[in-house]
Image (cartoon, rainbow, N blue to C red):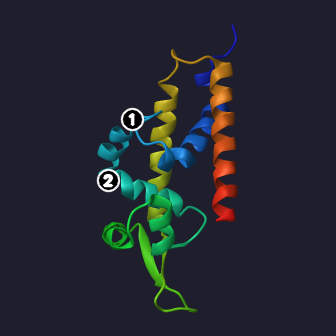
Amino acid sequence: MPKKWNEDNALVDSLAGNLFEALPLFPKRLMHVDELVRRHQMPFSHIQILIMLVGEDMSIGQISERLGIAKPNITPLVDALRDSGLVERIRSEKDRRIVHVHLLPEGEEKLQAIREDIAAQVKAWKGSLSRSEVKELSGALASMNRIAALVQAAE
C-alpha cells in the first residue's frame, strides 16, 4: 500500500515551510489562524511581523509598507514584541532616525513552534486532498513566495 502524503514528513515539512512563508499573505484561508493566535497568545499581526523578520532586519517603514499598516500603528506592535523579548530595536548607524527591528533567538524559537503547529494543521488535512494536490499546492506556494520576493525586490 502506498504511503499517504501526510505520512511523508519531507512533503509535509516542505508544504508547511511554504505555508509558513505565505502565512502573512493568507490569513484564515488555508489554515486556522485563530488557533495559532490562541495557542501562541499573540495577535496575528505579531506573527506576521516575526515571519517577515526571518533572515533580515527591517525598518518600521518597511514593515508598515509590507503589512499595509500606517507607521504609527506599527510602533506599538513592535514595542509589544520587544517587551515579550522576541525582537529588538536597533537605530541605523547611517541615519539615526531609522529604527531597524531585529529578530532575537527567543523570536526564532517562537517561530519554530508556530511552524510546528502549521505542520500539525497540514497533517490534519489528510482526507481532503490527494498527494498530487498537496504537491501541486506546495509547488504553487513556493512559486508564489518566489514571485512575491521578486515583486518586492523590484519595488
Residue in front for this viewpoint, 145 or 71 = 71
Tell me if 154 is positioned left or right of 40 in this view.
Answer: right
Quadrant of the rendered image containing residue 83: bottom left
Residue lying furthest top in this view? Answer: 1
Residue depicted at x 70% and y 56%: 150
**Callout 1 crowding tier (Cα within 10 Å): few <14, some 14–19, many ≥20:** few
- Residue 19 position within the rendered picture, expressed as x and y whole percent measured from the top left: 55, 41
Name the N-terminal-most of marks 1 and 2.
Answer: 1
Residue 122 drawn at (x, y percent)? 51, 30
**What residue sits right under mark 2 in the picture?**
43
Residue closer to the observer: 119 or 71: 71
* Tag 1 residue: 32
* Residue 130 point in image, percent of width and height: 62, 16
Amino acid at dot 1: His
Q: Which mark is residue 117?
A: none
Q: Residue furthest front?
A: 155
Residue 47, located in which quarter of the rendered image? bottom left
Residue at 32% x, 53% y: name it. 43
Describe the element under mark 2 as helix, strand or loop. loop
Q: Work out whether 108 lies above or below 85.
A: above
Q: Quadrant of the N terminus?
A: top right
How many angstroms separate mark 1 from mark 2 (CA)?
13 Å
Q: Which residue is drawn at the image coordinates 30% and 70% (left, top)?
A: 76
Look at label 2 and name its amino acid. Pro
Please say if 51 is above or below 72.
above
Q: Position of residue 68 (x, y in %)?
A: 44, 60
